[in-house]
Amino acid sequence: LKPLLDGTVAGIMMTNPNTLGLFETEIKEIATLAEDYGRTVDVNSGLNGSERAFRSLSGSLSSSILHIATHGFYFTATNVPQVTWFDKMSYKDNPLQRCGLILSGGNTAWNAVAKYDEIDDGILTGAEIAELDLSSFNLVVLSACYTGLGDIAPDGIAGLIKAFRNAGVRHLIVTLDKVDDKATSLFMKSFYEQLLCGVEMHTAFDDAVRFIKSTPEYCAARFWAPFILLDL
């Protein structure tokens, strides 16, 4: 990816191939919208949406937005699932090992169906993200469930929020609960439509929330309340 990441690239988009049907529409609509506004978008979906591809973004030069549509996870020290993948690490004292994103190959590694490289197994933990340099990204959007959760710590929420802050990201959109796929797609499309038109980021976010709230099918709080925009 690095050769593609110069000053002309407006955004990078990644998704998980195992759940591509859930996110494919969202990714395509946002990518098309950005291109309509003359922005260059690099889409990494299917097998290309890998942990290795994500790592290659570290130290990139001038990309402004990273949009990730996949599954997120966070577990407290006492409710980590009994899966083989967690057996290989000391996670209890490190909340950044208990949160992350599932990328290409992650489902297989999680269920220990096949042996994967421990570094590029498709399960990108908060601890791994925190070691990267993502300072070129003004905004990272985590279009996934539970990405705003973490342990309560003196310096804030120790989860993916802390991981991306340590990586140098300036603004982050996360969720505090499970989110509806269709409502999320509508929310993201509304947000990007305004952002690409030049509307200030926080205003675009607030307007997207109001748009979902005004939609009869998705006016209930569970459809819009989980989304938050953070200044890191």
Image (cartoon, grey):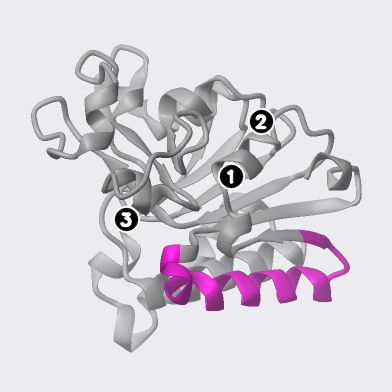
Residue 214 visible at all: yes
Q: Find out whether residue 37 is within the magenta segment.
A: yes
* Mark 2, other Cα within 10 Å: few <14 / some 14–19 / many ≥20: many
Q: CA distance from mark 2 to mark 3?
A: 24 Å
Residue at which label 1 appears? 140
The x and y percentages for residue 5 are: 84, 43
Q: CA distance from mark 1 to mark 2?
A: 9 Å
The x and y percentages for residue 24 are: 54, 74
Magenta stretch: dominant SS?
helix
Q: Amino acid at mark 2?
A: Leu
Residue at which label 3 appears? 226
Residue at which label 2 appears? 134
Q: Amino acid at mark 3?
A: Pro
Q: Quadrant of the C terminus?
A: top right
* Residue contact at pointers 1 and 3, CB within 8 angstroms: no
Q: CA distance from mark 1 to mark 3?
A: 16 Å
Q: Find out whether residue 148 is within the magenta segment.
A: no
* Mark 1, other Cα within 10 Å: few <14 / some 14–19 / many ≥20: many
